[in-house]
Amino acid sequence: MTRLPESAVDLVELIALGLGSGVASFIGVELERTGIAGLTGGDLVVGVWALAMGLVALYIGVVALGYEQVLPRVRSLVDEA
């Protein structure tokens, strides 16, 4: 069985985290749009729920994955190069 170089594994993890961050952020933005549409359309429960879930998804995408996972890994890969 062949072994992958450690840098290749790190690069695959970085790509996966970057995609996950982007998807979570996109879902967060769409939920925020849905929440605003719900509130302006008069559906208070759906609007507030979508806004709250949008904030959670944006936090996961931007802070938890992007800022705390992707950014340090990119910096370490750049420092190694």
Image (spheres, helix red, strand yellow):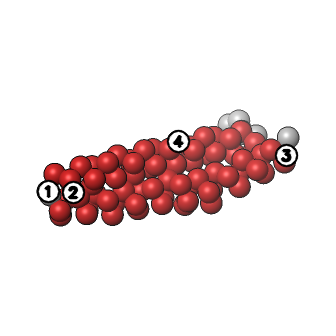
Q: Which residue is denoted by mark 2 in the rendering? A: 39
Q: Secondary structure at mark 3?
A: helix
Which of the marked residues, 2 or 4, is nearer the chain's N terminus?
A: 4
The residue lying at 57 percent from left, 44 percent from top is: 18
Which of the marked residues, 1 or 4, is nearer the chain's N terminus?
A: 4
Q: Which residue is denoted by mark 3 in the rendering? A: 80
The residue lying at 39 percent from left, 51 percent from top is: 28
Whole-angstrom CA distance, mark 2 to mark 4, is: 30 Å
Question: Which amino acid, by three-letter code, is at mark 4?
Answer: Leu
Q: Which residue is denoted by mark 1 in the rendering? A: 42
Whole-angstrom CA distance, mark 2 to mark 1, is: 5 Å
> Is there a contact, CB below 8 Å, between mark 2 and mark 1?
yes
Q: Which residue is denoted by mark 4 in the rendering? A: 19
| Pointer 4 local density, CA inside 10 Å: few below 14, some 14–19, many at least 20 | some
The residue lying at 72 percent from left, 47 percent from top is: 74
Where does residue 42 sit, x and y in percent of width and height? 14, 56
| Pointer 2 local density, CA inside 10 Å: few below 14, some 14–19, many at least 20 | some
The answer to whether residue 20 is seen in the rendering is no
Which of the marked residues, 2 or 3, is nearer the chain's N terminus?
A: 2
Where does residue 2 sit, x and y in percent of width and height? 71, 35
32 vs 40, nearest the viewer: 40
Which of the marked residues, 3 or 4, is nearer the chain's N terminus?
A: 4
Q: On the image, which quarter does residue 53 sit in?
A: bottom left
Whole-angstrom CA distance, mark 3 to mark 1, is: 54 Å
Question: Which amino acid, by three-letter code, is at mark 3?
Answer: Glu
